Image (cartoon, rainbow, N blue to C red):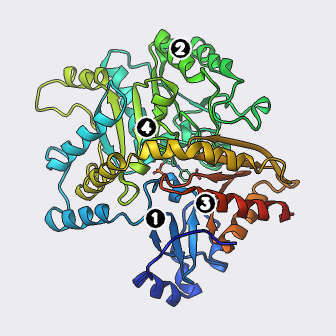
Amino acid sequence: MSISGSSMPAAGGFKARANALQAADMDAYWMPFSGNRQFKADPRLIVGARDCYYIDADGREIFDSLSGLWCTSFGHGRHEIADAIAATARELDYAPPFQYAHPLAFELATRVKALTPDGLDHVFFTNSGSESTDTALKIARAYWAKRGAPEKTRLIGRAKGYHGVNVGGTGVGGIEANRAHFGDMLVSEHLPHTLLEENRFSRGIPEHGTELADVLEERIQQHGADHVAAVMVEPMSGSAGVIIPPAGYLKRLREICDRHNVLLIFDEVLTGFGRTGAAFGAQLFGVRPDIMTLAKNLTNAAVPMGAVVTSDAIYQTFMNEGGPEYQIELLHGYTYSAHPLACAAGLAALDIYEREHMVDKAAALAPYFEEQVHRLRGLRHIVDIRNLGLAAALQIEHADGQPGLRPYKIAMEAWKRGLYVRFGGDTIQLGPPFIAERAQIDDVCNILEDIIPTID
Ligand code: PXG
């Protein structure tokens, strides 16, 4: 079986280069989050992309069932983004963001402010989700220091959370394997996750486990609110396999934070700009954080970019407590913050996001996606299925002593069948582009239905 309906133009330089690549040429590149040895023995090279498809070195079309890494949700090969990047590179390749600025930075920040929930009003640009995490954590600590509470430094994450791989994100993140081998991190305190037996095979927002939010109250009381700066969670955990908070859980976190003067940070790197069927998880769950982190769909991944969006109260604290006017209020920033190419890509991506009603598209496809994904219930090895908006995970029972092996085998087989799926831990994850069609969702599920029971 192959995937329906695309017309992929022949790839140019990438294809020729891929075909010329010898095993020895692959030695220098240390691939991220990859089995380098296995990949280099059996490479899966991508040489082009359009709409919902990649093209591989053999010219095969491969359906992109994870929107890249949850980041190309508006479809690949958007010319208007490419044109904006090219035109910008010719006019202003770079401008220093410290003490100087270019106009696109203001335009994009204003756009992001308008799109994010009311009350999140100021935008700090980074280059990735990981940088957004570390920026948000530093802003939280510095905010309390500026407010005269420098001992409010403790940061709390959640088990199975993923907030990127920099030092702050590795610490606040709660996927154990990602923390192993790296020693002590800035944060080592985590709320329990909400992946519960009794919620297995629930559709959308699960019912059980709201009270797990109360652990935050206990932790704050244990340390004293005077020592806790912030709690950081994803509105929906993506990397750990689409773990959706129970009904009312995030609201309860918000109430506890309010009661104890603790900042609530939502990591919306993956959920931002439509993935859950709402513009942001904050809106879907009706909870406004004090700080929101973004990346991925912000530029439709055409140029790396992240952002941290804060409340007016936080920003004004830095302005009011900033000392003489010439002084820097926040000693933090990146050489490539608000890079002109990233800003251009972001503005073009958000044009597409609004003009093509991407949130509505995702929301409209979501019920069908849910039906199709849950059709896989009952297949050998599948022990849970979770979904929200256009995100889903199949939990695969692992073979004795071999965690992660079955999902890996499933993904390798899927690739042969013209399907790119993400495998991580004991899950297969799906996050199709918002422009996907029903027939393509059918094909994804049919291929998985064929493959999964045949894996040992
Ligand atoms: N926060 C969240 C919620 C993320 O999902 C990051 C931060 C880090 O972003 P950067 O840009 O630094 O990678 C992410 C990244 C997966 C998967 O398999 C998810 C991510 C990355 C790679 C794989 O679900 N999310």
In the rendered structure, are the residues bearing label 3 and label 1 in contact, judged by CB atoms less than 8 Å apart? no
Which residue is found at the position 15% from the left and 32% from the top?
Answer: 327
In the rendered structure, are the residues bearing label 4 and label 2 in contact, judged by CB atoms less than 8 Å apart? no
- Residue 332 visible here: no
Residue type at mark 3? Ala
Residue type at mark 1? Asp
Q: Earlier in the sequence, mark 4 or mark 3?
A: 4
Task: Say above or below: 371 vs 205.
Answer: below
Q: Earlier in the sequence, mark 3 or mark 1?
A: 1
Q: Position of residue 203 (x, y in %)?
A: 68, 36
Q: Earlier in the sequence, mark 4 or mark 2?
A: 2
3D distance between C-alphas at marks 1 and 2:
43 Å
Q: Which residue is mark 3?
A: 439
- Residue 454 visible here: yes
Quarter placement of the N terminus: bottom right
3D distance between C-alphas at marks 3 and 1:
14 Å
Q: Which residue is mark 2?
A: 256
Q: Nearer the viewer, residue 28 or 115?
A: 115
Q: Is residue 414 left or right of residue 138?
A: right
In the rendered structure, are the residues bearing label 1 and label 4 in contact, judged by CB atoms less than 8 Å apart? no
Q: Which residue is mark 4?
A: 279
Q: Position of residue 449 (x, y in %)?
A: 77, 59
Which residue is found at the position 67% from the left and 28% from the top?
Answer: 192
Q: Is residue 208 left or right of residue 76?
A: right
